Amino acid sequence: MKKISPDTFRVSSKIKLSEAQTTFNLDASEKKIEKALESVRTKLGELQETMYAHGKYSVLVCLQGMDTSGKDSLIREVFKDINAQGVVVHSFKVPTELELKHDYLWRHYLALPERGKIGVFNRTHYENVLVTRVHPNYILSENIPSVKSVEDIDNTFWDKRFEQINNFEKHIAENGTIIFKFFLNLSKEEQKFRLLRRLKKQEKNWKFSPGDLKERLLWDKYQECYEDALNRTSKPHAPWFNVPADDKSTARYIVAKIMYDTLSTYSDIQEPELNDDIKANLELYKKQLESE
């Protein structure tokens, strides 16, 4: 099986999505890839327990991708061996009435993981420079004082919003949050196949919405917005990873391996040492229990 490195997928220079891979050959069968994923996610679970005991870092995993890119199933398969109390998933939908009474980042601040835990954002704060950029009329519901009509949502507006997002991520990174941002890069052909499968398989019908087809018509605009977001916001403290997503097993393994390899570089994540008093009396405590 081919060895991979986070650097292979990290967006560290300008990316052009029309030229970026949506497939990646691991030189292994699907069964072998799944076994490799099992091994990595077990190690991730052990590392999370150590991270919880250490109590100084949290991990934020951001997942973005076009409809049917496999976000839900990736969450299920990558994090299934982590203590259920150690990982919290948030799926961000259309903002509620309460959320719209605050700035657009407010609900994301509230959902940030506590130290020792992994937080997963299924769709993220980037929806505010993706779907809103494709549909700028959505911004009007935010009731921003300076925006009275769609005409007010110009390039300067988006420049400021990108700056705010970069500042948000810099702030949480400087305070102990390790950030992973994964763009599940799906081809238009594979999306067509997955949408058709939803229509053909009765047990998958519930996943289909006519709105999926309307958004598909805007594929090129979405790709343009994703490319701009990746290029503007992939930073050393909050990198984007372009994950080829046409094969789900491969995408899941790549995400898990990037996370584990990166977190393993944090040599300071160690279980805390017992204080001298407890350490000196371990044998006494054992005898006390054994004599009951």
Image (tube, grey):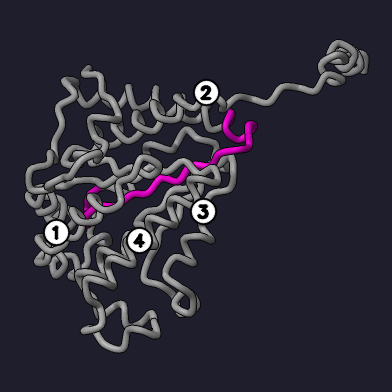
Q: Quadrant location of residue 84?
A: top right
Spot occupied by residue 15 in the image (x, y as percentages of width and height) = 16, 45
In the depicted structure, whether residue 200 falls above or below residue 60 = below
Residue 138: in sight, yes or no? yes
Q: Cα distance, mark 2 to mark 3?
A: 23 Å
Q: Are marks 4 and 2 in contact (CB under 8 Å)?
A: no
Q: Is residue 175 left or right of residue 135?
A: right
Q: Is residue 280 left or right of residue 123?
A: right
- Mark closer to the chain start, 1 or 3: 3
Q: Which residues are magenta?
A: 49-69
What element does badge 2 sit on? loop
- Mark closer to the chain start, 3 or 4: 3
Residue assigned mark 2: 267
What element does badge 4 sit on? helix
Q: Amino acid at mark 1?
A: Glu
Residue assigned mark 4: 163
At horizontal 26% and vertical 71% (from top left) the residue drawn is 156
Q: Are marks 1 and 3 in contact (CB under 8 Å)?
A: no
Q: Cα distance, mark 1 to mark 3?
A: 28 Å
Q: Quadrant of the N terminus?
A: top left
